[in-house]
Amino acid sequence: MMWVEGLTINGVLQPNFLRLKADLFSEDMFKSADEWDAATKNDANIQREKAKLLVIRTKGDATLGGVISFG
C-alpha cells in the first residue's frame, strides 16, 4: 500500500488517496486471516461461530462440485 500526497492527474491537483496493489493487498489479507485463525484456535466461542460461516468450494472440489455450502 502506498499513501500519495497531493498527486497531480492531467494537471489537476488531486486530494490525498490510498493506492493499493491488489495482489499485495490480497496476500496481506490472507496472511492476516491465517495468523488470526492460528491465534484463536483454542477459543471455543470463536470456533463455534466460525463453524456457522459460509464455505465456498472450488470447482475442483470432489465432494460438492463447486457449489456453495453452509458450514
Image: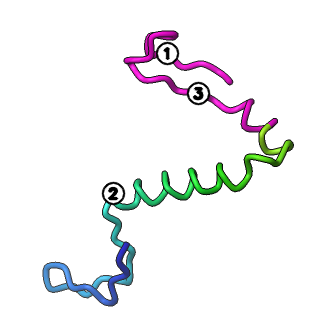
Q: Quadrant of residue 24?
A: bottom left
Q: Which residues are magenta?
A: 48-71
Any mark on residue 34, and which?
Answer: none
Q: Is residue 22 above or below residue 45?
A: below
Task: Judge from the rendering whether residue 2 lies leftward or rightward of residue 71; answer left or right.
Answer: left
User: Which of the pair 50/18 is nearer the observer?
Assistant: 50
Q: Amino acid at mark 3?
A: Val
Task: Judge from the rendering whether residue 38 lies leftward or rightward of residue 25; answer left or right.
Answer: right
Mark 3: few/some/many CA within 10 Å (<14, 14-19, 20+)? few
Q: Residue at x 74, y 31 (%)?
A: 51
Marks 1 and 3 in Cβ contact (< 8 Å): no
Q: Residue at x 63, y 29 (%)?
A: 54
Q: Amino acid at mark 2?
A: Ala
| N-term mark: 1 or 2 | 2
Image coords of residue 65 (percent x, y): 44, 10
Q: Quadrant of residue 19?
A: bottom left
Element assignment for label 1: loop
Element assignment for label 3: strand
Mark 2: few/some/many CA within 10 Å (<14, 14-19, 20+)? few
Q: Which residue is mark 3?
A: 55
Q: Which residue is mark 2?
A: 22
Q: Which coloring applies here?
A: rainbow
Q: Which residue is mark 1?
A: 67
